Amino acid sequence: MCSGSLTEDLGEIQLIKIEKRKYWYQDDWYLKYITVKTPVGDYLEFPCYRWITDEKEIVLRDGRAKLPRDDKTQILKQHRRKELETRQKMYRWKEWHPGFPLSIDAHSHSDLPRDIQFDNEKGVDFILNYSKAMENLYVNRFMHMFQSSWSDFADFERIFVRISNTISEYVMQHWKEDFMFGYQFLNGCNPVLIRRCTEIPKKLPVTMDMVECSLERNLTLEEEVKQGNIFIVDYELLDGVDANKTDPCTIQYLAAPICLLYKNLENKIVPIAIQLGQKPGPDNPIFLPSDASYDWLLAKIWVRSSDFHIHQTVTHLLRTHLVSEVFSIAMFRQLPAVHPLFKLLVPHMRFTIAINTKAREQLICECGLFDKANATGGGGHVQMVQKAMKDLTYSSLCFPEEIKAKGMDSKEDIPYYYYRDDGIKVWEAIKSFAEDVIHIYYESDEVVCEDVELQAFVKDIYVYGMRGVKTPHFLCSVPKYQPLWLFTVLSCFVVQYDWCSWIPNAPPTMRCPPPTEKGTVTIEQIVESLPDRGRSCWHLGAVWALSQFQDNELFLGMYPDEHFVEKPVKEAMAKFRRNLDEIVNTITERNKNKKLPYYYLSPDRIPNSVAV
C-alpha cells in the first residue's frame, strides 16, 4: 500500500499511473492500494491488488464502482477499453477436451498471469501433498503394495486414522447398516442425487412381493409411491463408461446401479432394492434387504463406489471446479476492475483458475494421480464429464430450483435433509447480499440491458465457456437478466475425508465384476473386490489432501481486500456477515449432542472461492 499528499488542487483526479523499474534481482511488487490526500483534506482510495512485475506501469482509477454509462470523458472510456483488451490477450479460452467447458489457455501454473497464481505454489502441489498426506497418515509403507489384497474388513483399520468423536470413525462403525447407507444420500459426501420417485422405471422391475417386507404402512408399492415415500438414485451416467486400464496387472470395474429407497415410519431413508446394471435380466438381479447378508452388503458397496465416482467427477470436478473457472475467465476478459460486478465477484474467484490448472497439470491429466487409484481414471472421467455436459442446465446450478425439481423441498416430508436446510439458508443470504449490492448500481432492467460489458460477460460464459452451441439446454435455461446466478459458483465444501476415508464405504475402484446371481457372495469375494493395499493408500492420501483448507483460506463473507469504497456496499457487507453469523449459530445449536453433526454448509466452513 502507498499513501501521498497533494499540496495544490489539481482538479478531479481521474487516473494515477504507477511505474516500476527493474533491478538486478527479483523484485516483483504486490500493490494493494494507494491513498491520496487532497489539499482540502479528503482521502481518495485507488485499489490495485495486483502484482507489478519487470519494467511495467499500471494505471489505476479511484475505488468508486462505475458502469460503462457512467464514464463521460474519453480518457476514462479509453482506459476501460484498454484494460479489457490487455486482459483478453492474457486470459484466453482453450479446449482441454472435446465437450468440456472451455478452460484457461495455460499448460502449467507458471504460465498463468502473475495476478492469479498461488502465493506459494508448493502449497498446492498435488504430488507433494499426496506424499505428505500418506506420510502423516502413516500409510506410506503400503502405498506400493498394488495387487495385495486386505485380509478382511478389520484389516482396513491398519490404514484408518482414528480421531476420537469424528464422523469418519462413526462411519467405520456403522457403514454396513441400512440407516447409514440411506443417510448418506441426504447428508453424506454427495447429497445431490436423491430424488422423489414418481413412477417406478420400467428398467427397474421391482414388484410388491420383492419389497413388501420393507414397507411399514400396510400400503402397496404403488400407493407408497403416490404418497411420496419412495425415492430413487440412478447412476445411469456411468453406463458405458470405460473402466481404468492403466494397470495391466489389475482389471478394474464400474457399474451403473439403480437404488430404490424408502422413508420408513421413523422418517429415515433406507434402501429397499438395488439393481447393479441398467438393463434388467436374469444376469442382473435386483438385490433386496431380505437376501443373504453378503449379497446385500456387496450390492450396497457397489452403489457407494458408483456414488464416489459421480461425486468426484461430476459434482466436484465439473459442477464446481470447471464451471467456476468459466465464470472466472469470463470475468477477467469482460469486466474491468472498475465495474461493480468485477468488484463483487473477484474475491470469489481467488485461486480458482490456479487450482484447476494445477489439477490438469498433475491430477486429472493422462497418467496423473487420478489414474492411480480410481476406476474412472485412464479416460473414464473424461467420458463422464462429456456425458454430464449434455444435460447440464442453469437451473440445476440454482440451489432451490434443483432441490424442488427433485421433489426434495418439503421439510415436513423429509425432515433430516440438513444439506437442503443449510444450503437454502446460505443461498438466501447470498441472494440478499447480491441483490443489495446490485440494486445500488442497477436501478432498472433497462440499465442492465444497456450494460454492454455485462452482456459480453454473459455471452462469454454461455456461448463460449459453456459451449452454448453444443449445450442448448444450458443456454436456453438462463434467465436473461438475473443477477443471482453470479453466485452459483459458491458450492464448494470440504467433506471428503469424513465419508470416504473408510475404504469400504467409498471404494475408488472395484477389482471384481458386479455379481450376476444371488447366493454366491462370500466375505472373501467382497474383500477381493475392494481396492488393494496400494490403491487404498493412494485413495486415503487423496481424500485427505482434498479435504484440507488452504493455509490462508478465506471463508464466506470475508473481504480483506477493499475493492469497494462506497458506504452502501460496506453496509451491505456488514449485513451479509450478520446474516451468516446467524446461520452459523443456528447450525451450531442444532448440532449439539448429535452423533452425526452436519456442519459442512456452515458459512464459517465454506471457502470464499473454489480453491480446494
Image (tube, rainbow, N blue to C red):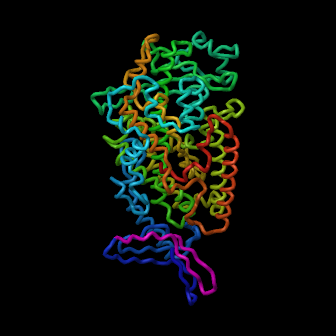
Image quarter of residue 65: bottom right
**x, y percent for residue 308:** 47, 33
Q: Nearer the viewer, residue 82 or 195?
A: 195
Name the residue at the bottom extreme. Answer: 8
* Residue shown at 57% from the left, 51% from the top: 487
> Image quadrant of residue 451?
bottom right
Image check: 348 left or right of 535? right
- Measured as percent of width and height from the top left, residue 537 is found at 39, 36
Compared across the picture, whether 515 is left or right of 406 comes to left
Q: Which residue is pictured at 37% across the width and 51% down the height?
A: 94
Does residue 197 show up? no
Confirm whether the magenta stretch covers residue 487. no
State the image quarter where residue 417 is shown: top right
Is 19 in front, or is 329?
19
Residue 105 placement (x, y as % from top left): 36, 54
Left or right of residue 264, residue 474 in this image: left
Give percent across and percent down for residue 558. Answer: 59, 58
Residue ranking furthest to the right: 412
Q: Which residues are magenta?
A: 26-47
The one of 349 and 578 positioned closer to us in this rendering? 578
The answer to whether any part of residue 386 appears in the image is: yes
Reply above or below: 413 against 497. above
Q: Is residue 105 above or below residue 239?
A: below
Q: Residue furthest left?
A: 248
For residue 346, above or below residue 223: below
Relative to 90, is 282 above or below? above
The prevailing secondary structure element of the residues shown in magenta is: strand
